[in-house]
Image (tube, helix red, strand yellow):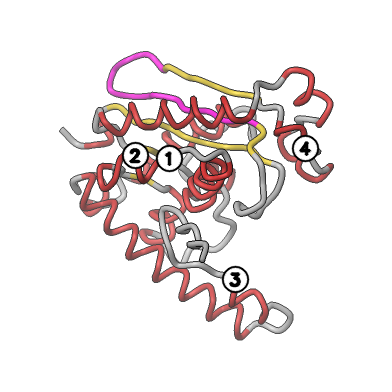
Amino acid sequence: MSWYSDRMCGFDLESTGTDPETARIVTACVVHVGGGAPTQSATWLSDVDGQEIPAEATAVHRVTTERAHAEGTDLRQVVDEVHAALVEAVHRGVPVVAMNARYDLTLLDREARRYGMTPLTDRVGDRLCVIDPFVIDKQVDRYRRGGRKLADLCRHYQVQLGDAHSAEADAIAACRVAWRLAQAGPGIGAAPLAVLHEKQVEWAAEQAVSLAEYFARTPGKEDRAATVRPEWPLIPAQRRP
């Protein structure tokens, strides 16, 4: 059975910022879809550990600091429960589908380390298989003009997005886009999960080199070249001396 005709585990985070090294989790979703079974979704709203949610972040996901503090679950508990849900999926051999996984998995990793928890990759090792529509789309249709955000992919692949920038809607949409991408060529849908995961490691690194070169030759963007990271599906944490 092909991976895309079985169960998929969508994963998405909404956060306080764009830097996974410093951002905090605001909302999270782990959703199981496909395989002829009903959709099962778990969602979380955190208290952001008492921190503030910048206005620009609220403009994206519509969660205010006041709401997070009043209604949110302790962020430490959210991080622990999200890890547990992902570990269960990985141990069952279910692929984790995450749009721009490099951001979400890095952020989850840093939150775990802040609380002294064992990060996901240390818990599951090389059993983790990730499907990243962002990376795969750029590989199979690299010269297509236009944006590559989730909303752009949903329009291109005719996938309903729903309530964009809610963690649940984005996680489900990412799985639907992954299903479409699986049919883009035999190298995607027919590839064993572990093989496809390793291919994405290579593709993400190649895409990072290309992006850095673009920044380096574009006036006004030269400084951004040094910020492009090739690692995928997450950026390893720096070892403290």
- How far is disc 2 from disc 3 in space, using C-alphas? 28 Å
Between residue 162 and residue 196, name the one nearer to us: 196
Q: Amino acid at mark 2?
A: Arg
Q: Are marks 1 and 2 in contact (CB under 8 Å)?
A: yes
- How far is disc 3 from disc 4 in space, using C-alphas? 26 Å
Residue hosting label 2 = 123
- Residue 194 appears left or right of 102: left
Q: Earlier in the sequence, mark 3 or mark 4?
A: 4
**Residue 144 image position (x, y, % from top left):** 49, 62
Q: From this view, report whether residue 27 is shown above or below residue 208.
A: above
Nearer to us: label 1 or label 4: 1
Disc count in the image?
Answer: 4
- How far is disc 1 from disc 3 in space, using C-alphas? 27 Å
* Residue range (magenta): 27-39
Sort mark 4 into few (<14), some (14-19) or many (20+) by Cα contacts within 10 Å.
few
Residue 25's tag is: none
Residue shown at the point (61%, 78%) measured from the top left:
215
Sort mark 3 into few (<14), some (14-19) or many (20+) by Cα contacts within 10 Å.
few
Residue shown at the point (55%, 47%) measured from the top left:
110
**Residue 193 image position (x, y, % from top left):** 23, 44
